[in-house]
Image: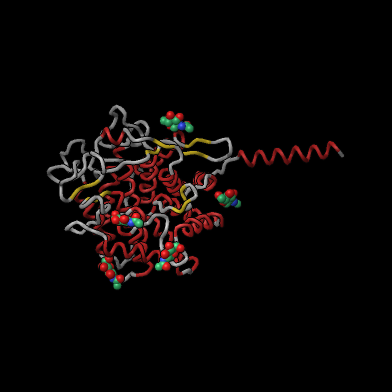
Amino acid sequence: MLPQVATVLAVTLFATTKLVEARPKSYAVWAADSVIARGQGNGLTAGVPSVQYADGEFQWGLRLLYERTGNQSYFDWIRMGADNIVANNGSVIGGYNLSSYQLDPLRTGPTFIYMYEQTGEAKFRQAANVYRGQLNVHPRTEEGQFWHKLIYPNQGWLDGVYMGEVFYTRYTLAFDTHNATAWNDITSQFELMFDHTIQLPGAQNDFGLLYHGYDYSHTAIWASPDRGHSPEVWDRALGWYMMALVDVLEVAPANSGPLRPTLLRILNTLVPKLRDAADPTTGAWWLVITQPGRALNYFESSGAAMYIYALLKSVRLGYVEDPHGSIVAAAKKAYGYAVENWVIPNADGTMSWNNTVVVGSLNTDGSFDYYVSQPVDLDDLKGVAAFLLASLEYEKL
Ligand SMILES: *[C@@H]1O[C@H](CO)[C@@H](O)[C@H](O)[C@H]1NC(C)=O
Ligand SMILES: *[C@@H]1O[C@H](CO)[C@@H](O)[C@H](O)[C@H]1NC(C)=O
Ligand SMILES: *[C@@H]1O[C@H](CO)[C@@H](O)[C@H](O)[C@H]1NC(C)=O
Ligand SMILES: *[C@@H]1O[C@H](CO)[C@@H](O)[C@H](O)[C@H]1NC(C)=O
Ligand SMILES: *[C@@H]1O[C@H](CO)[C@@H](O)[C@H](O)[C@H]1NC(C)=O
């Protein structure tokens, strides 16, 4: 009797230990489960409702993973995240303030639309309408570009295109699909940003990529005298813009006028440049892309994950041709570097994600010294959410 019990016990213990230690084969699953285990991405910061664009980014990945696996926990996590920042009367709580005219909060809007489509609950539609209402009164440059925030007059930042236009597109698609003005407006947000921030041939440290932002009035301390752009190409800002291109293209309908051709043209301009900007040895990208190898510059993980996602998705959906396989090869090489260097297995079976820079803002001088002086974080959701997205694409190869 006793030895048998002991055997059963031992087997059970062994199995349990194995379960705890075994990590999911899929990095997408591992990343998502780890974020959930840490209680991230659910509309709360230190237990308090809080509208965070990184939650929207993560929930986007989680939705794709839910569609792939059917694991109800993922859907429930997204729903909890939306419930935490949408009151029963449909107002957005968690620090959202329409009159401060920021684009960042709007990146949580696609989750509201998804929840409305899945549950039919009116509060989610009302919450989406709140954000859409903001866009109708959001301050713009004379040419029509949304200001990044009220406190940054006349400034367009690449980040804002991901925050604003992914929502604007999803909203128009869901509720307003015949609104040609809206489709033209979305197109113009991408185009104005591109035209004002593209590095022109012959520029110093020219990679043919996009500077972090521009000031239409040329008055910001960092604005170049000739075109008003900021001085450096910051990896994550360009990462947001690249993700916005592929995420909007994926759903842009046939009746969206100039949207598809414009985004395809921009994507086909940027993708080869981005491929060529990767460090030849490691396959990773520098934090300040325009200053490869300079002291204190380093390979940053959130931007890289965003690029991997955008490069692979561009090729998979046929937006960019890759006849020699060099684009996919660049993404694969960078992914290998990411897994080797930035994924850290923890004793509790979760993974951590390293080397994501906490912030890069143009409320500074936008200099190289500024970008490289910012702290780097472990388990920063902006980065690990991008790694989830990159892994979803990688695992489709
Ligand atoms: C579903 O997701 C949850 C939350 O991340 C995870 O704990 C669980 O193991 C997953 N279930 C399956 C069957 O994979
Ligand atoms: C909606 O609900 C929130 C949170 O309960 C509350 O603060 C707000 O005043 C309500 N708005 C209206 C218009 O009733
Ligand atoms: C919302 O933002 C506006 C503009 O910055 C500010 O004047 C107002 O005090 C803010 N409201 C709250 C409740 O913080
Ligand atoms: C169509 O979109 C434009 C631009 O955002 C907006 O001003 C207008 O109110 C929208 N029309 C309708 C019927 O919603
Ligand atoms: C994360 O990366 C930094 C910088 O490369 C390194 O110093 C740190 O030890 C890493 N953290 C972990 C938990 O490995």
Task: Describe the colour scheme in one phrase.
Answer: secondary structure
Is residue 156 or residue 341 the one in the foreground? 156
User: Do we see residue 397 in this rendering?
Assistant: no
Q: Farthest residue toward the right?
A: 1
Q: Is residue 38 left or right of residue 19?
A: left
Q: Quadrant of ligand 4?
A: bottom left
Q: Position of residue 369 (x, y in %)?
A: 27, 32
Q: Is residue 209 left or right of residue 310?
A: left
Which residue appears at 29% of the width and 29% of the height? 293
Q: Is residue 367 left or right of residue 219?
A: right
Residue 145 picture quarter: bottom left
Which residue appears at 46% of the width and 47% of the height? 388
Which residue appears at 49% of the width and 65% of the height? 118
Indicate the quadrant containing the N terminus: top left, top right, bottom left or bottom right.
top right
Is residue 115 or residue 284 the one in the foreground? 115
Q: Position of residue 212 (x, y in %)?
A: 26, 44
Q: Is residue 319 above or below residue 285?
A: below
Which residue appears at 32% of the width and 36% of the height? 287
User: Do we see residue 214 in this rendering?
Assistant: yes
Q: Farthest residue toward the top?
A: 295
